Structures are given as structure tokens and as C-alpha cells.
């Protein structure tokens, strides 16, 4: 292509604005410049790169011109609109009574279409809650939905978007005019500092505050509510006027869940991310996605697939993905300024993450004013001015000069890193579900790699993540039920389930006033490190337990015989010395009674010397290892 043609083409392709007429005019000019053989290639370039670029640019302009800059920074808007792929959604239980049949969508329904239909219907669906895990695209959806609304000619209602993680969210909601003709989008209930304290009370207050709006859509992390049943069903707002037979008297909260990306959606994203002349990198990225399921579950991670492709190493856990992202960013930053060292910047980022998390109530949001940030940077010896002005940091700046992490999940990863480093500020903090999952992954990773757990697990809140094992006795546990249990739990049994891998324990050996204990942080159980010194009958084993409780062994009076599930959780898939048992336990108790029975005359025992469990006549002898 001659130079003058190239210049004309560049001049033409950079002149895209917002109207269809201008687009057609530009296309006409381009086709006039290029002819014949280059036409197909040019059209491919236009429709695969230039047109999507123009549409994204148009949406960014609309959002920047119609949203207060203090709500969403330009960086957030850019990240949310770039290479965007429409998500799907689903309901938890399409057959449930609380979900009307016409709102029971399947996992391949386009979320934009679903929300359009819900907002267009009668006031029956006045409150919607969109739930998804962190990094799945809740905020991105709201921003893209708002941009699409702004592009529409006929709207039918006003649309307002307010993030709940800002200090003046309620005041902004209260000042919105013509509420009865307005649909309100409320972003991130889980970042609302009042909801973090008491989500039920905060939801009630929000319903009162928004009761005059035409419709309300609220986004929130799925795990923000400890149990799904804690997500309220009724709003407390009574319907006015006649109701259909069986219709509830109050408006209900209707739940929608973002679906993980399908293979087709991942492919669509990668095609947007990598042009047709970048096929090799697209292929590498696709191979990375196939190896790491979390990339398709969390589009936020998918957006950083290039960093992972460049790193080119095996990744099996989510925390490894975050580390690759942080490491790539640190290396980029270190190369910009000669006096900015990677390790100093890492320390600053981790400490700042902890500070934002601990002081979110005082500041009213998970963000920090520039003045406070400058004080911290000075104390931590970071050249703040030139670093932040580089525009490449993990932090975003809003129009009011406040800073927050670009991704909350990255902030939470950095907090967990700081906890592992032994920062006392992390010991009494509130743990989010994502932070718990990250720490649990790191523990599992270290156990699998035989690396030491060199931090105090007891100072972390891992509630809800421990393996739950049956603790209630069964009076007639059959052979078939045992076989199914072993396979379901993945326990090793040399006779019945040789493929069982067992579980990775996180044992902690402690010593109390009159006995040694082993705490299993994987199951939440506390075991006797030893047990009975001789074999006993089943009835004598029960007597042994009563004696432990009467004398308050090791300071506890709730000792019991383990269930078969609990006892088999200790079975190792290979011998550790002479027993299929971790050496943290005393070796004398080579076989132990469980509380479960096969019938009146036989109870189940676990034999660590043989690597099996079996029925044992109650008159026979076995050792006792109590649990609580």
C-alpha cells in the first residue's frame, strides 16, 4: 500500500464518532481508497477490530458524560466496556414457588434480555437481586446496561445508577427526581458499610428508601448472605389494587444469578481480545483457559489472560492467578521509575489493602482520600507522586481524588498475603468469603507440596470452609452404605476403595493440662493424640468415653466415639511407617472403635494397620481414640 494511501486510511479510520451516517460515510471513503484484492481484508479488519473499537469508545463517552466521575472512574469504565461479552443468567430453583414461571430462565438466557423483560413487566417484579461471586462482572453488567439504555431512542423510563459502596449513597438516592418513573440500579450491596454490619437491617432501610421507584435492581456477592434462605423474600411493601388468585400481598425480591461463561462466550471474548493476525496468542490463551476453569468463572481474571500467557507456567489455584497478575504489574511498575523497587511496592500495596479493609467504616467506603494516602506512602517510603501519576497502578482514582483498588478481589488477595506474613493488624479483622477461600487454597497448596504452614491458622476465620463429616451415630449402617460413603468422600480403603486419595489434613498438635490433642483444621475436629492404652470391648469403650468426660480430659467434657466417616477421614492412602495413619498420632492405637453399628451385635471399626474398615463383634476388642 503506498504511503499516501496509508495516511488517508489512518485519517479515515480515526474519524469515527457516534452516528450511523458518519460510520457509513467513513466506510465509503475507505472502500474508495482501497479496491479489488484488498477489500476482503479491509472489511475483515473493519468488522472485527475497528467497528468494535468504535462501539466501545462510544459507550465510554456516554458513560463518562452521564455519570458523576466520583462514582466510577474512567479506568473502571474502560475496563468494564473493553471486549465486553453479554453474560447469561439463571435462577436458583426455576420450579420454586417464589419464582414465577415467566421469570424462571435457563442458564443460557441473555442477562440483558432477562432484565429487559423483568423491567417491562408489571410491578410484580419490582425488586430484583442479581447475585454472583466476586469478579464475575456485576458492575460491568450495570455499566454496559446503562450505556445501552443511553443509546436507545425510545426509553419509556428514566434510569439511575448508584454504587452502594460510597458514603453518600442514600443522599444521592433521595435526591433523584420522578422516582415513580425511574428504574434504580444499586451496585454492590456487599460493599455497603452498613450492610456489612447488618445486611438484613440495611436491606429493610433500602426498601424504605426506594419504595417510590418504579423498579429496583440490586447487585451483591452470592456469599454475602451466610445462607441462601437469609436473602429476604418479601419486601414489606404491600401491593395496592386488585390481585390475581394466588398472588402475594407484598412485592417480592426476585433472585437472578450470573452464570459462568460458556465455552462459546470464552471463545467470543478471546476473538475480541486477539485480532485475527494474533491467532498464535489466541491459541495460547485458549489453552490456558482450558487448564484453568477459574478463568471462565470469573471474567475479571479472563481479562488478564495475557499476563498468564506471558508467564507460561502451570497454574492450578485461584491465588496463583492473582499472584501472576500482581507480579506482572509490579514488574511493569519497577521498570518505569529507577527508585521504585518491586518489593517496596508490594509491601506498600499489601499494607494499604489491610488499611482500606480495616478503616472502611470510618471512611464510609473501601477507598482513601489522597491526603491520607500521602501520609501512608511517606511512612512506608514510597515515591507516591510519580507512581500514582503513572496511571498504571493497582489503584483507581475518582473525580474527588479518592483512591481504591481497581479490583476488590485483588485487594482481598493482598490482605491474605499480609496475614500470612504475620501482620497483627489482620488477626482480628472480618474475613470475607473470598478471603477465606484464598487462604484455604494456599493451605491446600502447601500441604500438597509438603511445604510448612508457617502462619497461625487459628487467627483466621475459616468458618464455612471446613469439610463437614457426619457426627450423628447410625444404628444400622449397611455394607453398601459404607461403600457409597467411601467413594463419595474419596476415603482410602484397601479392600473397598483403593483409588481413594483421602483428604489433605492440616493437623496441629497441642498439649493441655492432662493430655495431648491433635486439632484437624480441615474437618474442625479435635482428637486424642493417643487414646486407650489397651484394647477394650465396645461397651468398655463407651465406659472409657464417660470416664474422659467425668474427669474433664484436657479441659473438655464433650468427648465421644467417632462416626465411621470421622474415623476413616484419618486413613492415609499409603503406609506412614507401619500404619495407614499420620505420624502425628500415637502408634499404639492400630485399630479403633466407631460409634456406628451394623446391628445390635456388631459395630464398625477402623484398622489403620490393615488400611480398611470392617464390622467387628461388640464383644471383640479394639482401641479407643476419642473425638470432639
Image (tube, rainbow, N blue to C red):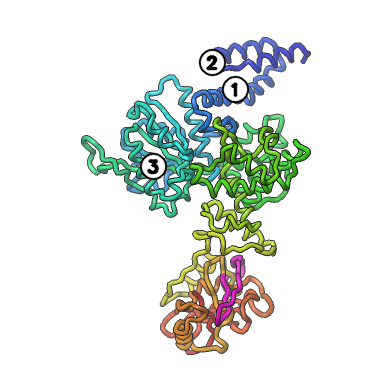
Q: Which residue is mark 2?
A: 19
CA–CA distance in space, label 1 to label 3: 35 Å
Which mark is nearer the camera, 2 or 3? 2
Q: Kindly identify which numbered label has been placed on residue 54.
A: 1
Q: Decide: marks 1, 2 in contact (CB < 8 A)?
A: no
Q: Nearer the viewer, mark 1 or mark 3?
A: 1
Instruction: Report which quarter residue 45 is drawn in.
Output: top right
**In terms of depth relative to the viewer, which is nearer, 79 or 102?**
79
Mark 2 or 3, nearer chain start: 2
How many neighbours does mark 3 have within 10 angstroms: few (below 14), some (14-19), or many (20 or more)? some
Q: Position of residue 127 (x, y in %)?
A: 36, 39
Label of residue 104 in the image: 3
Distance of mark 2 from mark 3, alpha carbons? Answer: 37 Å
| Image position, residue 227 (x, y; %) | 42, 54
Give the side of residue 154 with respect to residue 138, left or right. Answer: left
Asked whether residue 264 is in view, the answer is no
Amino acid at each position: 500500500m503506498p504511503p499516501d494511501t496509508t495516511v488517508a486510511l489512518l485519517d479515515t479510520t480515526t474519524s469515527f464518532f457516534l452516528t450511523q451516517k458518519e460510520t457509513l460515510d467513513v466506510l465509503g471513503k475507505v472502500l474508495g481508497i482501497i479496491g479489488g484484492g484488498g477489500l476482503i481484508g479491509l472489511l475483515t479488519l473493519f468488522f472485527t477490530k475497528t467497528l468494535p473499537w468504535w462501539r466501545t469508545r462510544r459507550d465510554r463517552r456516554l458513560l463518562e458524560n452521564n455519570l458523576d466521575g466520583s462514582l466510577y472512574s474512567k479506568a473502571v469504565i474502560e475496563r468494564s466496556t473493553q471486549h465486553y461479552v453479554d453474560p447469561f443468567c439463571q435462577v436458583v430453583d426455576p420450579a420454586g414457588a417464589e419464582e414465577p414461571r415467566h421469570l424462571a430462565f435457563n442458564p443460557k438466557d441473555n442477562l440483558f434480555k432477562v432484565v429487559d423483560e423483568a423491567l417491562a413487566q408489571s410491578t410484580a417484579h419490582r425488586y430484583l437481586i442479581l447475585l454472583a461471586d466476586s469478579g464475575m462482572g456485576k458492575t460491568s453488567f450495570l455499566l454496559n446496561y446503562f450505556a445501552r439504555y443511553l443509546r436507545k431512542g425510545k426509553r419509556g423510563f428514566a434510569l439511575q445508577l448508584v454504587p452502594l459502596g460510597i458514603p453518600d449513597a442514600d443522599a444521592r438516592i433521595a435526591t433523584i427526581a420522578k422516582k415513580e418513573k425511574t428504574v434504580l440500579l444499586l451496585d454492590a450491596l456487599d460493599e455497603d458499610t452498613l450492610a456489612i454490619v447488618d445486611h438484613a437491617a440495611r436491606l429493610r432501610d433500602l426498601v424504605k428508601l426506594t419504595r417510590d421507584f418504579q423498579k429496583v435492581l440490586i447487585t451483591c456477592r452470592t456469599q454475602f448472605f451466610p445462607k441462601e434462605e437469609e436473602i429476604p423474600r418479601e419486601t414489606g411493601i404491600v401491593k395496592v389494587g386488585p390481585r390475581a388468585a394466588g398472588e402475594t400481598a407484598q412485592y417480592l425480591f426476585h433472585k437472578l444469578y450470573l452464570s459462568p461463561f460458556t465455552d462459546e462466550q470464552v471463545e467470543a471474548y478471546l476473538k475480541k481480545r486477539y485480532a485475527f493476525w494474533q491467532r498464535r496468542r489466541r491459541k495460547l490463551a485458549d489453552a490456558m483457559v482450558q487448564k484453568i476453569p477459574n478463568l471462565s468463572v470469573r471474567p475479571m481474571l479472563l481479562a488478564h489472560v495475557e499476563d498468564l500467557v506471558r508467564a507460561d507456567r502451570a497454574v492450578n489455584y485461584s491465588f496463583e492467578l492473582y499472584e501472576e497478575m500482581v507480579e506482572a504489574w509490579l514488574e511493569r511498575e519497577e521498570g518505569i521509575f529507577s527508585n521504585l523497587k518491586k518489593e517496596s511496592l508490594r509491601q506498600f500495596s499489601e499494607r494499604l489493602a489491610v488499611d482500606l479493609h480495616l478503616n472502611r467504616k470510618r471512611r464510609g467506603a473501601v477507598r482513601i482520600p489522597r491526603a491520607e494516602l500521602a501520609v501512608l506512602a511517606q511512612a512506608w517510603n514510597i515515591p507516591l507522586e510519580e507512581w500514582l501519576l503513572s496511571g498504571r497502578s493497582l489503584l483507581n482514582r475518582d473525580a474527588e481524588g479518592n483512591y481504591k483498588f481497581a479490583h476488590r478481589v485483588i485487594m482481598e488477595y493482598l490482605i491474605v498475603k499480609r496475614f500470612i506474613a504475620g501482620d497483627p493488624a489482620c488477626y482480628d479483622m472480618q474475613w470475607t468469603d473470598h478471603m477465606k477461600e484464598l487462604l484455604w487454597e494456599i493451605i491446600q497448596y502447601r500441604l500438597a507440596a509438603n511445604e510448612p504452614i508457617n502462619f497461625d491458622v487459628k487467627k483466621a476465620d475459616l468458618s464455612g470452609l471446613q469439610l463437614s463429616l457426619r457426627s450423628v451415630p447410625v444404628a444400622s449402617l449397611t455394607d453398601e452404605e459404607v461403600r457409597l460413603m467411601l467413594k463419595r468422600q474419596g476415603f482410602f480403603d484397601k479392600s473397598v476403595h483403593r483409588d481413594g486419595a483421602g483428604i489433605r489434613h492440616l493437623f496441629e498438635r497441642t498439649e493441655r493440662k492432662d493430655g495431648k490433642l491433635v486439632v484437624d483444621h480441615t474437618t474442625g475436629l479435635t482428637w486424642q493424640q493417643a487414646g486407650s492404652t489397651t484394647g477394650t470391648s465396645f461397651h468398655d469403650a463407651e465406659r472409657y468415653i464417660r470416664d474422659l468426660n467425668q474427669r474433664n480430659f484436657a479441659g473438655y467434657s464433650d468427648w465421644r466415639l467417632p462416626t465411621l466417616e470421622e474415623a476413616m477421614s484419618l486413613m492415609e492412602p499409603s503406609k506412614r511407617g507401619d500404619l495407614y495413619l499420620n505420624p502425628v498420632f500415637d502408634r499404639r492405637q492400630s485399630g479403633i472403635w466407631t460409634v456406628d453399628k451394623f446391628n445390635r451385635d456388631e459395630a464398625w471399626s477402623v484398622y489403620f494397620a490393615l488400611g480398611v474398615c470392617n464390622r467387628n463383634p461388640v464383644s471383640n476388642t479394639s482401641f479407643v481414640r476419642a473425638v470432639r
